Amino acid sequence: MSDVEGFESGAADAAERIRNAGSALVIAHIDADGITAASIASIALQREGIDHEVKFIKKLDPPMLQSVLDEKYDVLWFVDLGSGMYSKMDERCIVADHHRPDSMERERHVNPHLYGIDGSSEVSGSGVTYAISVAMNANNKDLSALAIVGAVGDFQESAHSRLTGYNHKIVEDAVEYAGMTAEVDIRTFGKQTKPLPILFQYSTDPKLIDYITDQIDDRESCIRFFTELGIDLNETVYWTQLDRVEKAKIVSALVNRMIDRGRGVTDVKKLLGEIYTIPENTVGTPENWIMHLPEDMRISARVLFDAKEFATLLNACGRHELPEVGMEVCKGDRSEYLMKALNQQNGHRESLKTAIELVKLGEENGIREEVSGVSLHNIRFFHGGKKIKDTILGIITGMLLNSPEVQCSDKPLIAFADSSDGSNTLKVSGRGTKEMVDHGLDLSLAMIKSSKECGGTGGGHNIAAGASVPYGKENEFLLKLDRLIGQQINGE
Ligand code: C5P
Ligand code: C5P
Ligand code: ZN
C-alpha cells in the first residue's frame, strides 16, 4: 500500500526544482514541526548557496496565500502547510506537507497522502522537508534529528509509543548520521530536566502519582519510593543519570504497583516507549556549549537532549510569537537565542495550566454536550472565547481529551476561541483518539465540510484538525460536525 519509492522520487523531483532556483522563500507553520521543517529547509538552501528568507505563518488562508504569491522569489517552498490550498497555487510553489491535501496532483507536491503513507503517524512536515533536503544533497542526513523533533512535536509517536513507518527510516538516519540514540525507556516528560521526585509527582501520561502516593504528602511519597529502592537522591538527581539496572528496578516496582491496583493495563502499556536522545553537539552548535552557559541555565538547556522536550521548547517559542527564535536554536545557536527560548518556557507552561483550569472549572468555558437545547451525540465542545489564546487551543484540547480527571476520551473534543488576527472569526481545534480513527473518524474531512458550509475553512489530520468559522456560526457548525462524525463512526 505505502509507496515509499514513489514518495522519495516525488521528493527528488521537488529537490531538483529547488536546487535550480536562484532565490527561495520558505513558508512554514509556527509549531514545533513547522519550525524544524523551516530550519531543515533553510540549512539545506544555505548549503546549496541559494538566497532565501523564511516566513512563519499561523495559517494559510486565501488572503495569506495571495500575499505569498505576490512575493518575487523563484521558488515558494511551503513546509508543514500548503496541501490544503495546493490547487490554488502557481508554478513557483513547492509543497512539503503532511496535512490532508485538496488535490492528488503530485507535481511540485510532496505529501504522504499521495503515496498511501499515513500523514498523522508515519511522516510529519519536517520529515517530508527532510526527504527533499536529502534528495538535494545526501550530506543533509545530519539534519535527521531535527525531523525527529518535528515528528514527536506532532505526537506522531503516540499511537505506538515509538515512531513507525517512514519516520523510523529517519530515526535510523539520525542514529547513523546525527549521533541520536533511540532506546526503550520510560516515557515520562522531563527526564533530562526534572529531579526524580518531581518527575514522578507531576507525570501525566500515565499519572504515576496515583500508584505512589500515601494520600498525605505526594512529594514525600515520591522521595520514599526512590529511597526504598536504594536510589540516593543526593547523588542521582535526574532520570538520565540512572544506569540500566536502576531503571529496570524502578520500572518493575511501578509495574507491580500498577498491577496491584488492578486498573493498570493501559498505564503499563503507556509507561515505556522508544525515547530519542540528541547529543550535545549537533548541526551548527559550538563545542562544549553547555559549559559556556550561565550556571543557572545549564539544567534547563538539557531540554535540547530530549526530542520531546526540545519540541516543547519550540512550541513555547512559536505559539507565543517567536518562531524565529526557535529556528535559530534548531540551526545551532546556543547563546542569545537559546536564552530567549528558555525564558519562554515558564510563560508557555503557565498559559497552558491557566487555560486547562479555566475549562475544568466548568461555567461558561466548561465542556458541554448540547447547543441551544439540542443534544450533541457524537462530540463534546468548549468555548474559550477571549480567555484562551488561539495558538494554544489545539494543545490544550489534546491535553483535556487525554486527561484522566476530565474523562472525556470517548468522543472527539472540539474547542473554540476568538481568533487573535482581528479577522472576526473563531479558531476551532478538534482532537480525537486512535480508537476513534480506527472506527472511522476523519476529523479533517468533517471540519473541512462543516466549516465550508458555514463560510469558513478547515483542514488537518484524521486524528487532529482545525478550522476558522465566522463569529456566531458556532452552533450551526457544531450541529453539522456532530452529524458528519456520527456518519463516519456509526454510519448514522
Ligand atoms: O499542524 P500540525 O500537523 O503540526 O498539527 C498536528 C497536531 O496534531 C499536533 O499538534 C498534535 O497535537 C495533533 N496530533 C495528535 N495525535 C496524533 C497526531 C497528531 O493529537 N496521533
Ligand atoms: O490548531 P490545531 O493544533 O488545532 O490544528 C490541528 C491541525 O489542523 C493542524 O494540523 C493544523 O495545521 C490544521 N488546521 C488547518 N486549518 C485550520 C486550522 C488548523 O488545516 N484553519
Ligand atoms: Zn505538522
Image (cartoon, grey):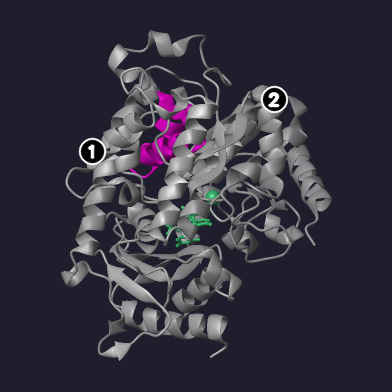
Quadrant of the snapshot with the N terminus: bottom right
Q: Amino acid at mark 2?
A: Tyr
Mark 2 Cα shell of 10 Å, populated few (<14), some (14-19), many (≥20) = some
Q: Residue at (44%, 42%) from the top-left corner?
A: 253
Secondary structure beneath dot 2 equals: helix
Q: Is any part of residue 174 visible from this angle?
A: yes
Q: Residue 245, percent across and down? A: 53, 28
Q: Residue 414, percent across and down? A: 38, 69
Q: Residue at (50%, 65%) from the top-left corner?
A: 433
Q: Earlier in the sequence, mark 1 or mark 2?
A: 2
Q: Is 130 positioned to the left or the right of 413 in the image?
A: right
- The residue tagged 2 is 177
Stretch of the chain drawn in magenta: 302-328
Q: Nearer the viewer, residue 348 or 236?
A: 236
Q: Nearer the viewer, residue 168 or 318?
A: 168
Q: Residue at (23%, 47%) from the top-left corner?
A: 214
Label 1 CB-ligand 1 distance < 8 A:
no
Q: Is residue 319 magenta?
A: yes
Mark 1 Cα shell of 10 Å, populated few (<14), some (14-19), many (≥20) = some
